[in-house]
Amino acid sequence: MIFLGIDPGKSGGVFAFGDLRIPIIHKCPDTIKDMAELIWEIKSLDARYYTVIELVHSFPGNGSVSSFKFGRNYGEWLGILAALSMPYVQVSPNKWMKHFGAMPKEKKDRKNHIKHLAQQRFPDLKITLATSDAVLMALYAKDIYK
């Protein structure tokens, strides 16, 4: 079994672990081709996949350009998963974060807390702010599917 977490923003990341010799951790690739190749690499491992992708939406106050770019990247991830016939579950940030206990209200503090939680669980990996959400989403996938 492989558990895959995808934080779909351009400043997000991908994390896969489970029946892997070494977990796969990657900041969001710059191109759709690279995004697809990363998911294809994970899918080619011939295992059962449990994928969680963060359910995202625009926020009041976000500019239309940034909202459009964010939505476009999210749609690209969904298209890649669909094209590769990889089933997935969309989970709101509130739901997967609540699974790991109380979170700080301030965004910067919350992001650092998430990174700390991810690093505790995988001390041998270099986890960044870009990849930490994906790590916890993959852990969430493991917890809900087992």
Image: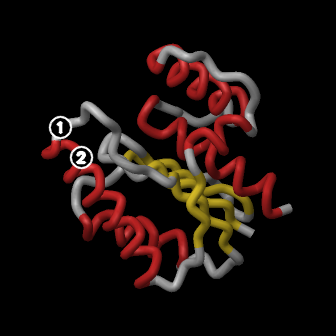
Identify the disc placed on residue 30. Answer: none
Look at 31% across and 35% down and name the residue there.
60
Quadrant placement of the C terminus: bottom right
Which residue appears farthest toward the right when viewing the image? Answer: 146
Q: Is residue 95 left or right of residue 64?
A: right
> In this image, 39 relative to 91: left or right?
left
Residue closer to the observer: 120 or 144: 144
Query: Residue at (24%, 46%) from the top-left corner?
Result: 67
Whether 80 is drawn above or below 74: the answer is: below
Is 33 displayed left or right of 130 in the figure?
A: left
Q: Which residue position holds label 2?
A: 67
**Residue at horizontal 55 percent and vertical 21 percent from the top:** 110
Secondary structure at numbered mark 1: loop
Front residue of 66 and 145 = 66
Rendered location of residue 19, percent (x, y): 73, 64
Q: Are marks 1 and 2 in contact (CB under 8 Å)?
A: yes
Query: 6 or 72: which is nearer to us?
Result: 72
Give the alpha-carbon distance from disc 1 to disc 2, as whole Å. Answer: 6 Å
Q: Is residue 86 above or below residue 4?
A: below
Q: Position of residue 125 (x, y in %)?
A: 59, 36
- The quadrant in which residue 34 appears is bottom left
- Percent x, y of residue 50: 67, 67
Q: Residue at x 66, y 56 (%)?
A: 17
Q: Label 1 belongs to which residue? A: 63
Q: Amino acid at mark 1?
A: Gly
All told, the count of numbered labels is: 2
**How far across and down, in percent of the image, does residue 28 sit?**
36, 50
Report the amino acid beneath label 2.
Answer: Ser
Image quadrant in which the N terminus is located: bottom right
Other-residue count near label 2 (Cα within 10 Å), few / some / many at <14 / 14–19 / ≥20: some
